[in-house]
Amino acid sequence: MIDLEHQDIQFLPGVGPQRAKLLGDELQIHTLHDLLYTFPYKHIDRTRLYYIHELTADMPYVQIRGQILSFETEGEGRKRRLIAHFTDGKGVVDLIWFNGLKYITSTYKTRTDYVVFGRPSAFNGRINIAHPDIDPADSLHLNTMGLQPYYNTTEKMKRAGLNSRSLEHFTSTLFEKINFTIPETLPEHLVASLRLVSLDEALRHVHYPRNAEELRKAQFRLKFEELLYIQLNIIRYTRDRRQKYRGFVFARIGTLFHDFYEKKLPFELTEAQKRVIREIRKDMGSGKQMNRLLQGDVGSGKTLVALMSMLIALDNGFQACIMAPTEILAEQHFATFRSMLEGLPIRVELLTGAVKGKRRQEVLEGVKQCNVHILVGTHAVLEDTVNFNSLGMVVIDEQHRFGVAQRARLWTKSTNPPHVLVMTATPIPRTLAMTLYGDLDVSVIDELPPGRKPIQTIHQFDNRRESLYRLMRSQLNEGRQAYVVYPLIKESEKMDIRNLEEGYEQLCRAMPEYRISRVHGKMKPAEKEAEMQAFAAGETQILVATTVIEVGVNVPNASVMVIENAERFGLAQLHQLRGRVGRGADQSYCILVTKYQLSADTRKRIQIMTETNDGFEIAEADLKLRGPGDLEGTQQSGIAFNLRLADLARDGQILQLARDTAEKILDEDPFCAAERNKILWKQLSKLRKTLVNWSAIS
Ligand code: ADP
Ligand code: MG
């Protein structure tokens, strides 16, 4: 039996040291085991042969059998191409090559039977196949070949002649060498009760299935296994942590909470807010350490829930801290809290990079002496100089902008870990949440404060500005305000700022009767601050900005959000931006301005935005359109998605099964000691070394 995990790939016949290096560098294939687990991204049915006269340009891939009649070259220099006239006795089709001409003419002969495989297209009314795969007919056994695997390769590999075909050759050679049953990696009782195919069968069929059903079963088994181990890891870690850490017990609701609720709260809480506050209270009184994710659409009133939760900590003699991702947002929270808590014996302070010198010393001293009860800040609160006297509760706003490591540092600010509330307005689809935040309890605010009218979203091409100006004017004349937002991307920052400047000037010319603020990332903080303040105070009516306003700015009087170059924003971002308006009782508008020519994906995105205001629906759509690896937040959160096969957007049901199975296993075998699960725990400890610590989220 060969040792798949330790046998170097270079010793596989046909590989050798040079190709082994490429495989290692480009695809992380170092051992035979790695190769075995490099799965094809698609399969092509090679059981069917077509006649040439059947071919049409809209067929994906076809296979024909016949002989080359003659070769011919056309064109000069870079346009030179080689044409082989190919016949099956009933029709003729042109095979075309734009490079490697010499190789083709010296390899393939006329009057020899070949099987040709490729994608037909039409040119000048004739069907041709460019760069087809050609095999001598007697070397293939088409009726037994079944589905042919296609493997990803990189440009560098292709230049060295390593293509999907080469990988196919390697995997088929490997399977010839594996003349034994590949050992199982799941316990027998699971394989049996869930009717999974064995690992041996799954691995063989995921590369070389004879039909679609075999492929599906193989993929199901491998996806399930992949997700099961992730879930086992998360759930085990979570249960462990709950055992180990006792949380502070906030047994009582005291006068601060009550006084705030009775005297300060300017409105009635929504049912959803009440429910979430109850959930948080229960956590904090339970003796376990709270780790809760609070999801709620922009404007749903999360900040208020955070504030009231912090008051519970204060009532029990502890300090609280809220961390925001930007200075502007921190400042806004600070201002909100100060005004809402006015008259109550609570000292709120702000700590950001902009708080310096003597002021900073005062804040730090107050935090240390417990004179500061609520500290509002950016990641500045994580610095070593910040020492709390008794930190009992931490709120992290817009969590996706903080990395795992940053969040983990908060724990060190207190001898016992504080209760943690993570808030996000980017709703995370359930499947993703289960994988990313499997150890967090989840609360959802699924209701907006009453009296809000759904925002009306309109798509507008950028050559039709007049109707845009008309809408803006009608709102501004009613005393409302408007945002005009431009994308800002690091790579094209200069261009983006120029776009913004031009847009600003255009707007000044088109609407001279209004006062306009302008904010972008290249301005000095003080200047930026002044412009923002002017808009927030209602001194200016229009704010032209890059995405600096994306997170958190709260100007309830604003009723128009114009998003320029909307095609360049992702769905999550568009939704976030849109949430900046619609905060009052009147009708608000979001106008997505795009160029005329749009890709299919972009059109879909814009359409979704105009059709729904529901953040969860949008998040699901986003996951489907972009895939989880791209989702805002998953990258910054420092969690690599090294899923080989499972797709969080599509395999929700398998994930659920994996989660339920993992729960059940750990219920039955809490100490991970049962003989029948031995293989699981062995496998898990092996995988743990390679998995990022998924669950150390907070
Ligand atoms: P989020 O942080 O979820 O985006 P905020 O907490 O900033 O939302 O709330 C948005 C606005 O709604 C704020 O102006 C806030 O004062 C207001 N608000 C919050 N809860 C309520 C409520 N129950 N009724 C009316 N207005 C509310
Ligand atoms: Mg908020």
Image: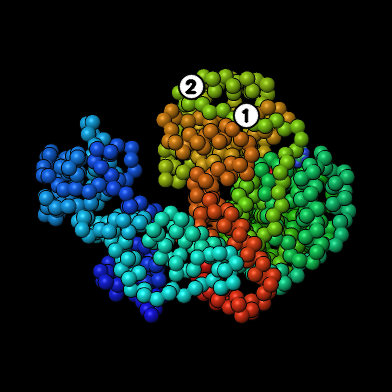
Colouring rule applied to residues: rainbow
Provide the secondary structure element on which disc 2 rests. Answer: loop
What percent of the width, then of the height, locates residue 668? Answer: 69, 72
Provide residue 680's location: percent of width, then percent of height.
57, 73
Residue depicted at x 79% and y 61%: 284
Determine the secondary structure under disc 1: strand
Q: Kindly identify the residue that appears in the image at 76 percent across and 45 percent down.
A: 272
**Numbered mark located on residue 430 in the image:** none
Q: Is residue 437 left or right of residue 105?
A: right
Distance of mark 1 from mark 2, alpha carbons? 18 Å
Report x, y in % for residue 659.
62, 61
| Image disc number at residue 464 | 2
Q: Which residue is mark 1?
A: 456
Who comes first in sequence, dot 1 or dot 2? 1
Instruction: Tell me if mark 2 has few (under 14), some (14-19) or many (20+) residues whose alpha carbon lies within 10 angstroms of its own.
Output: few
Q: Are marks 1 and 2 in contact (CB under 8 Å)?
A: no
How packed mark 1 is, by other alpha carbons closer than 10 Å (few <14, some 14-19, many 20 or more), is some
Q: Residue at x 29, y 75 (%)?
A: 11
Nearer to the camera, 595 or 510: 595
- Amino acid, disc 2: Arg
Residue kind at label 1, given as amino acid type: Gln
Location of the N terminus (image quadrant): bottom left
Q: Is mark 1 within 8 Å of ligand 1?
A: no
Q: Look at discs 1 and 2 and give the one toward the viewer.
A: 1
